[in-house]
Every structure is written in C-alpha cells, then in structure tokens.
Amino acid sequence: MGIIKEDLKKFLDLKYQEYNNLNFIEKDPIQIPHLFEKKEDIEISAFLISVISWGNRKSIINSGKKMMNILDYSPYDFIINCSEKDIKKINFTHRTFNSIDLQFFIRSLKNIYKNHNSLENIFIAKNKTEFMFDGISNFREIFFSIDHEKRTEKHISNPKKGSCCKRINMFLRWVVRDDKNVDFGIWKKIKKSKLSCPLDVHSGRVARKLGLIKRKQNDIKSLIELDKNLRIFDKNDPVKYDFSLFGLGIYEGF
C-alpha cells in the first residue's frame, strides 16, 4: 500500500470510529429494527425499512414507525399469522411505496418463512462469487415468484440490470456486520468480507473526491470499483467504511 493510500486508510478508519457509535442510531432509520430483540423481528423490520429508505431520513423514520404500527410492533408474528383479509386492510404510503406494495411484501415474506425457512438461506443459496450479487438476484427471483403487480418490482433493485442495489446492500450490512454498536450481526452464514458498500449520491460523491471511484454513474461497475478499493484497506470488513463515506457526505458536506 502506497503512502497516499496509507494516509487515506488512516483517515477513513478515523471517520469510521467517529461515526460508528450509538449516537448514529438516533437519527438513522436503523433505529426501527433496534426496537426489537427477536431475530426474525429484526430482519423483517430491517428489510422493510431499508426498502423505503430514500429521501429525507426523518420522513423514512416516521414512515417506518407507521409500518411497524400496522404490523402491531410484532412483524414476524403478524406476517406468519395474518389472513388475506388482514392484508387487504393495510393502508400505507411512503413516496412511491404504497398499500399495494406493502400488501405484496407481506405476502411474499409470509411465503418465504413458510416455504424457504429463512431470509438468510435465500441470499446464500446461489452466491458463489466474492460479492453478494448472485445472492441478491436469487432473493429477488424468489421474492417475486408469487403473483404480484409489476409495479412492486421497482422496489427491489436488480444487479443483473446493472443496479448498485443500495438499499439491499444497506440491509445486508445491518444484519451481517456485528460491530457491537450499530449493526446487528444476526446472520452468521454470510461473511462480512462479501458485503458491498451501499452506494448512493452522498457516498458516491465522497468516494469520487477521495479517488475511490472514477466512473460517473452510481451503477454496479462503480460499486465493484469501490468495493475492490475498500478491500485494500480492510479485506475482512470493507463495508465498515460506509460509515466513513456516509458521515463525510451527510454531516460534513465533504
């Protein structure tokens, strides 16, 4: 590692320590799954909150609380035991994610828990590469394997179509990493070395200023470029630097 990259690693490590703490939770959507202790409740709430995580964070958190209220603040129990009549009563809107979408997501999660045992197993099943793209594709295929309206598909990005899958990668960071502060580490079968940074407009801007990405688009090619550079700094836990990039972009206007 050259002197410049050594300095950059030290800088990013410092920012990771600065932003990876309990204070981070207070203003972040991850506070919603932190309301729960049961593994299934954490992963369901984390998944649903990650799906609606675009736009203003305060709005996301408020919508997340409304969503959990609909699920009686017991998401796993609600999903396993709800009837079709219960599902059709659901009324919810967050930006373009509406009642039709949430109703389908509950049906699909119900199908997964009843017929595929767990969410985690689906992400593992066909993932043979150094990244999680195959696992995400397999999850997406199974998630939309039951009847659904076409509009719902836009809420889970497709890596096969070049998407950087920001929200799903954020969800995976939450459930796979165990940092004793923010992320949960409840999934033990996926190595955190396989995780990708949740690339968005803020982290992408910072990454380009730091020379970690050269491409202009926030697509899967840029994500791979970023991932490979972050793996130089920490091959076992590259996605920890999401805290660094996010903090620099959101809080410091870097």
Image (cartoon, rainbow, N blue to C red):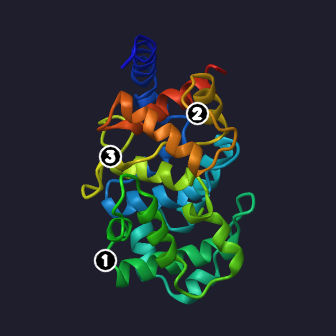
State the mark number for residue 213: 2
User: What percent of the width, then of the height, locates residue 98?
Assistant: 71, 68
Point out the residue furthest to the left here. Answer: 188
The mark nearer the N terminus, 1 or 3, is 1
- The residue depicted at 44 percent of the width and 79 percent of the height is 110
Q: Determine whether label 1 and label 3 are within 8 Å by CB.
A: no
Q: Which residue is mark 1?
A: 117
Q: The residue under label 3 is which amino acid type? A: Lys
CA gap, disc 1 and disc 3: 22 Å
Q: Which residue is mark 3?
A: 192
Q: Determine whether label 2 and label 3 are within 8 Å by CB.
A: no
Disc 3 element: helix
- Near-viewer residue (104 or 170): 170
Q: Nearer the viewer, mark 2 or mark 3?
A: 2
Disc 2 element: loop
Point out the residue furthest to the front here. Answer: 2
- Near-viewer residue (76 or 248): 248
- State which quarter of the image contains the C terminus: top right
For mark 3, does the 10 Å Cα neighbourhood hold few (<14), some (14 to 19), or many (20 or more) residues?
many
The mark nearer the N terminus, 2 or 1, is 1
